[in-house]
Image: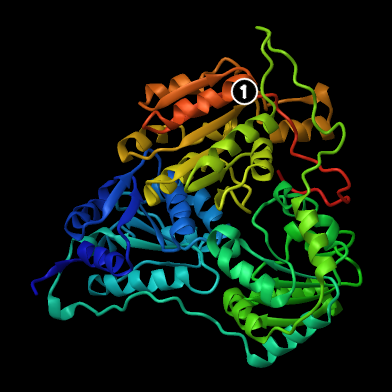
Amino acid sequence: MSARSGASLVTDALVRAGVKTIFSLSGNQIMPIYDACIDAGIRIVHVRHEAAAVHMADAWAQLTGGPGVALLTAAPGLTNGLSPLFSARSAESPVLLLSGDSPLGADGMGAFQELAQTQITAPLVKAALRPRLAAELDKDVSAAITVAISGRPGPVHVALPFDLLQQQVPAEQIVAAAKPVRHRIEPPRADVEAIAARLAQASRPLVLVGPMHNATRAGQRLEAARRALGAPVIPMESPRGLRDPALGGFADVLARADLVVLLGKPLDFTLGFGRTPAWNPEAQAIVVDPEAHLVDRSRGLLDKRLQRAVVADADATLDALCQASRPADRGAWLDEVAAALALRDLKAGSVQPAHAAADGTTPALPTEICAAVQQVLDAAEDPILICDGGEFGQWAQAFCRAPTRVINGISGAIGGGLCYAIAASIARPQATVVALMGDGTVGFHFAEFETALRANARFLAVVGNDSRWNAEHVIQMREYGPQRLIGCSLSPSVRYDLAAAGLGVHGAHVTAPGQLQQALAEARSAGTAACINIEMNGQAAPVYAMQGATPRGPH
């Protein structure tokens, strides 16, 4: 074998890990990898903003189960991708972030775009490294992927010095690398037996899991665990926590549970920190987590209510518990929890009546939009639902459903919806992808409609247009009153459909509920991505009847 470039060693690692698609925006320091991707047969989906590449890698990881790869250029390219990196960490997505970097040989000399990149990303990722030897690039990248997919999945950053990428490495000097394999921290058998015994004794247990065990990513494991444990197993992946409209009346059953088992679900703001009134003051808890510091945090928050704390992987523990489970007759409790999760009865007066526009038309309510979208999802053989945004995003999560779903996640960041939709369409070209988002959300990465056109990504972007940042508008109305509204209005004259059409995709404008079905049908048959701009009567997130009072969380 002849000498290999450092860049080709990077692509060797990607190919060995099964990577065939990466998301990127071009830049000086990563041109060697672009060139190496040609010989490696790796597709580059090149985007309009670096943050979009990381958002796409996040969605790719969630939908395929493999690592999502984003390739960014140095310094400003990397820093443009920081916000979605935080979202990927919160979503427990195995993302490999590769960034170009200034040459090692010029360190400290003021090289072009020299920046201490790994010091910046370290708080946002599981690991951040800057290789020192070109011969070890394959090994280093492969090791980074192993970290990303092991334990609680999450992003890893590798900064790639430009001189290492260009260097030619003799074959005999290349350090061999192994295919990345997920390492699991298995729970001790004694802990598994003790947890199984405690579960069998409980009358009203709840098993809570995090984003990596949502229905999209672990649906079969969830169903198997519910049957084997005879207990509700509930994934949580929303920043609204107990107020997540997709969980219906979950807050009420949590407040009645006598045992809460957290399997990889961190105890944090989404669970009211384990305090009353969110939790039953008599409830006991068991915590299993692959990260020791999160187990220690639970000890401090739960004190004597914590019955057992184990450092182990959530999936390994769930599998072991299914093997060790003991039969328990909790039919009434299971029915009660199922009914609570299915609750969608809106509280009287929680939806404000729609007012006619100046031209006499009545904007659609969120429920009307969701109902029309659900018909599209129900008719599709392989539907994928994307939910992104503040208040309208909550309506979408509550009243639209599909076997595969990606939401903007626990980070609370919005704006990635278009990017998620592009990645979803590329990952599953035959799927019907519908992304619901607000008019504020769609503006973050609007230029990616052009990326969708180039990448032949097809999806329906359903934009609920209420001409404002409605989540913040709701907060201001509630906390300060209508006379103190500031900084939340958007222009009612903006035609997102026409702007999208200018970027080459299908655009449609809906001014009344009666136009929804036809607009969606035409968009589905357009053959491209579509932006459906729907005049909407903005509403606060759904509030259900008979739902218990819960702590307020972020929007």
Q: Can you name the residue that lies furthest to the bottom here? A: 190
Q: Which residue type carries mark 1?
A: Leu
Can I make out residue 534 in this image?
yes
Q: Nearer the viewer, residue 129 or 333?
A: 333
Q: Quadrant of the C terminus?
A: top right
Residue at horizontal 50%, vertical 63%?
A: 125
When the figure is inspected, residue 553 is found, relative to residue 19, above or below; the finding is: above
Residue at horizontal 73%, vertical 54%?
A: 241
Q: How is the image coloured?
A: rainbow
What residue sits right under mark 1 in the picture?
A: 490
> Which structural element holds mark 1?
loop
When the figure is inspected, residue 76 is found, relative to residue 154, above or below; the finding is: above
- Measuring from the top left, give residue 334's x and y in whole percent: 79, 66
Horizontal side of 122 relative to 69 (left or right) equals right
Can I make out residue 72 in this image?
no
Packing grade of label 1 (10 A; few <14, some 14-19, many >=20) is some
- Measuring from the top left, give residue 510's x and y in whole percent: 56, 20
